[in-house]
Image (tube, helix red, strand yellow):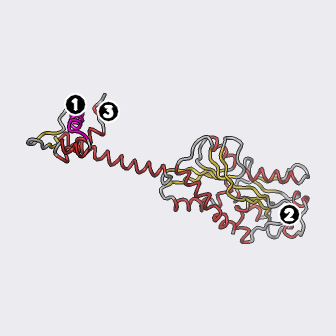
């Protein structure tokens, strides 16, 4: 066993107390020990290191040797580091420090930055790392345990998760303001089905919802889908007149407000889905993740209101 492995905190505290008090008996009183117990700690320390830690001046006045001074200096630094570690551990336990990886589906990127900004103000000691992907990518991350928390629509069947609904996610039909559907007083299913639809890539939740909506029109299998790689590209394509689309209202809130897009009324629209905050059910949340989840639940209504206004 090395000398370092043989050291104990009790021995180091005994050395420090005797050095400060310059007396074994006074050190024993300070440490609530007997003098023989303090002497035993010092003897064990010197045997472990193979050198004297103290020398005596007079009847009972102890002074540290050079070796003792070196050990006391190292102990002071180590104790300071340990005290800081205790503070850090307490902050981690209370959720006031740590790292939280937040995975969000791409539709949520229109409000997620505002959410993260609020989290940073409320929990300055917590680093929130935002990861954005389509539904397939987020599901893969959940399976790989890559996220502490996830914001998405329909919860997955696997892996096992805890899913808490946090608000509505309305999906609306969007067309250019001069589109023929924008001028119709009553839109029939045939009117919608006849239009070219622009939608996301396979694996996107919006893509699956659009395909299901078109199938529910009961006019056959949709074969006129134009695929785009991002919501931004879809919006610009619809504005340019390349087709129409069904998108989350969070995605098109700014364009609807400015009039660059309009949302005609039709049967079974908007399609109301829910947003969920999700985490794996087979592992406990860290203190920081618990606090982040709590803040999401308490603040998301205001964020949704701001994003959709």
Residue at the disc numbered 2:
266
When asked about the image quadrant of residue 61, the answer is top left
Residue 263 as seen in the image, left or right of residue 254: right
**At which x and y percent is residue 225?**
81, 53
What segment carries the magenta color? 33-46
Quarter of the N terminus within the rendering:
top left
* Residue for point 66% across, 63% down: 304
Residue at the disc numbered 1:
47
Disc with the residue nearer the chain's start (1 vs 2): 1
* Residue for point 71% across, 42% down: 157
Q: CA distance from mark 1 to mark 2?
A: 88 Å
As helix, strand or loop, the secondary structure at mark 2 comes to: loop
Q: CA distance from mark 1 to mark 3?
A: 13 Å
**At which x and y percent is residue 300?**
63, 61
Q: Is residue 152 magenta?
A: no
**At which x and y percent is residue 2?**
30, 30
When asked about the image quadrant of residue 264, the answer is bottom right
Front in this rendered view, residue 179 or 249: 249
Q: Residue furthest top?
A: 1
Marks 1 & 2, CB-CB < 8 Å contact: no
* Residue for point 72% across, 50% down: 154
As helix, strand or loop, the secondary structure at mark 1 comes to: helix
* Residue for point 69% across, 46% down: 136
Q: CA distance from mark 2 to mark 3?
A: 76 Å
Name the mark on residue 175. none
As helix, strand or loop, the secondary structure at mark 3 comes to: helix
Q: Is residue 43 magenta?
A: yes
Name the mark on residue 5. 3
Front in this rendered view, residue 50 or 141: 50
């Amino acid at each position: 066993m090395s000398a370092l492995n043989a050291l104990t905190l009790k021995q180091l505290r005994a050395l420090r107390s005797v050095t400060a008090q310059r007396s074994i008996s006074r050190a024993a009183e300070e440490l609530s020990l007997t003098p023989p117990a303090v002497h035993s700690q010092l003897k064990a320390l010197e045997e472990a290191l193979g050198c004297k830690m103290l020398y005596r001046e007079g009847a009972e006045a102890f002074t540290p040797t050079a070796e003792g001074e070196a050990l006391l200096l190292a102990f002071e630094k180590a104790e300071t580091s340990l005290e800081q570690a205790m503070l850090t551990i307490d902050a981690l336990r209370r959720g006031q420090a740590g790292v939280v990886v937040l995975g969000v589906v791409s539709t949520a990127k229109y409000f997620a930055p505002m959410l993260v900004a609020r989290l940073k103000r409320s929990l300055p000691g917590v680093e929130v790392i935002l990861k954005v992907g389509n539904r397939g990518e987020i599901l893969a991350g959940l399976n790989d345990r890559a996220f502490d928390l996830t914001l998405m629509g329909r919860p997955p069947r696997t892996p096992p998760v805890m899913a808490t609904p946090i608000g509505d996610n309305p999906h609306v039909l969007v067309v250019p303001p001069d589109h023929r559907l924008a001028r119709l007083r009553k839109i029939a299913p045939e009117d919608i089905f006849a239009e070219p639809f622009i939608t996301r890539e396979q694996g996107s939740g919006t893509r699956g919802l659009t395909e299901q909506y078109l199938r529910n029109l009961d006019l056959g299998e949709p074969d006129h889908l134009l695929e785009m790689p991002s919501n931004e590209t879809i919006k610009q394509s619809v504005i340019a007149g390349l087709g129409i689309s069904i998108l989350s209202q969070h995605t098109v809130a700014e364009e609807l407000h400015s009039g660059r897009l309009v949302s005609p009324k039709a049967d079974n629209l908007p399609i109301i889905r829910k947003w969920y905050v999700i985490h794996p059910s087979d592992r406990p949340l860290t203190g920081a993740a618990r606090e982040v989840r709590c803040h999401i639940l308490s603040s998301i209504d205001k964020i949704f209101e701001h994003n959709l206004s």
